[in-house]
Image (cartoon, rainbow, N blue to C red):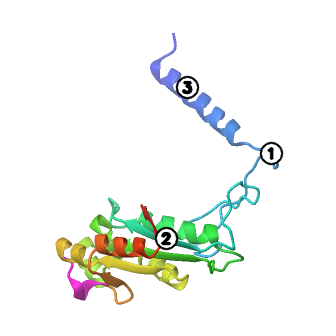
């Protein structure tokens, strides 16, 4: 009779070999490499030129991303912002942001902290703001970034601690109602 340790190791070896076999794909079976053509380092995409749904270069897309979720770790980049970068990368052409894509981001709730200046972020969370680089790259790609003014006060962050390159909205709800009236589609992340 085999000992439990030997059985465990044999089972672990079997699982590992099955996993290795399932990931051994031929060149024809491999998918394209992950890329970040516009927002380098964030929002990676897998180009699929034969996919049925593709952005229409003749259409105009107006979207407001409502980002209320914060990350459990103060060291992590906000996943909502990461997904906005993915959208910019999906619509981008030849490394350039799409001219027909108008994106507004409204940050509130747990996501409010991503707009703190580095010194304020470090004083509260013990680390530099991990979102600074991504915020800059999104702005460079034409994404408009706003934070809910009500959330700033609710969170106790206060206006002098907010980055100067972030706009302040009276409130996330008011901004989304106004942008919806202007033809923007609201997407919650």
Quarter of the rendering occupied by the C terminus: bottom left
Residue at point 41% right, 71% down? 180
Work out whether residue 36 can be spotted: no
SS for dot 1 = loop
Q: Quadrant of residue 175?
A: bottom left
* Cβ–Cβ under 8 Å for marks 2 and 3: no
Measured as percent of width and height from the top left, residue 3 is found at: 48, 17
In magenta, the rendered stretch is 156-162
Mark 2 or 1 closer to N-term?
1
SS for dot 2 = strand
Mark 3 or 1 closer to N-term?
3
Tell me: 9 left or right of 77.
Answer: right
| In the depicted structure, whether residue 46 falls above or below residue 91 | above
* Cβ–Cβ under 8 Å for marks 3 and 1: no
Residue 37 falls inside the magenta stretch: no
Look at mark 3 in the image and give the residue it sits on: 11
Q: Nearer the viewer, mark 2 or mark 3?
A: 2
Gap between marks 2 and 3 measured at Cα: 49 Å
Query: How many numbered badges does the structure rendering display?
Result: 3
Measured as percent of width and height from the top left, residue 19 is found at: 63, 37
Q: Nearer the viewer, mark 3 or mark 1?
A: 1
The residue carrying pointer 1 sits among few (fewer than 14), some (14 to 19) or many (20 or more) residues within 10 Å by Cα, namely few
For residue 26, the mark is 1
Q: Quadrant of residue 151?
A: bottom left
Q: Quadrant of residue 77?
A: bottom left
Measured as percent of width and height from the top left, residue 28 is found at: 82, 48
Mark 2 or 3 closer to N-term?
3
């Amino acid at each position: 009779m085999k000992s439990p340790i030997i059985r465990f190791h044999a089972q672990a070896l079997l699982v590992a070999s099955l996993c290795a076999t399932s990931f051994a794909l031929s060149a024809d079976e491999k998918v394209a490499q992950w890329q970040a053509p516009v927002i380098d380092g964030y929002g990676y995409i897998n180009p699929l030129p034969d996919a049925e749904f593709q952005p229409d270069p003749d259409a105009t897309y107006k979207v407001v991303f409502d980002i209320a979720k914060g990350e459990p770790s103060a060291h992590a980049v906000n996943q909502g912002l990461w997904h906005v970068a993915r959208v910019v990368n999906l619509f981008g052409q030849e490394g350039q942001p799409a001219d027909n894509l108008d994106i507004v981001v409204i940050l509130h709730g747990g996501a409010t902290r991503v707009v703190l200046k580095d010194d304020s972020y470090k004083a509260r969370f013990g680390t530099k703001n991990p979102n600074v680089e991504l915020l800059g790259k999104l702005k460079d790609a034409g994404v408009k970034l706003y934070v809910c003014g009500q959330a700033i006060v609710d969170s106790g962050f206060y206006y002098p601690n907010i980055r100067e390159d972030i706009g302040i909205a009276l409130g996330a709800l008011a901004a989304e109602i106004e942008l919806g009236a202007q033809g923007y589609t609201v997407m919650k992340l």
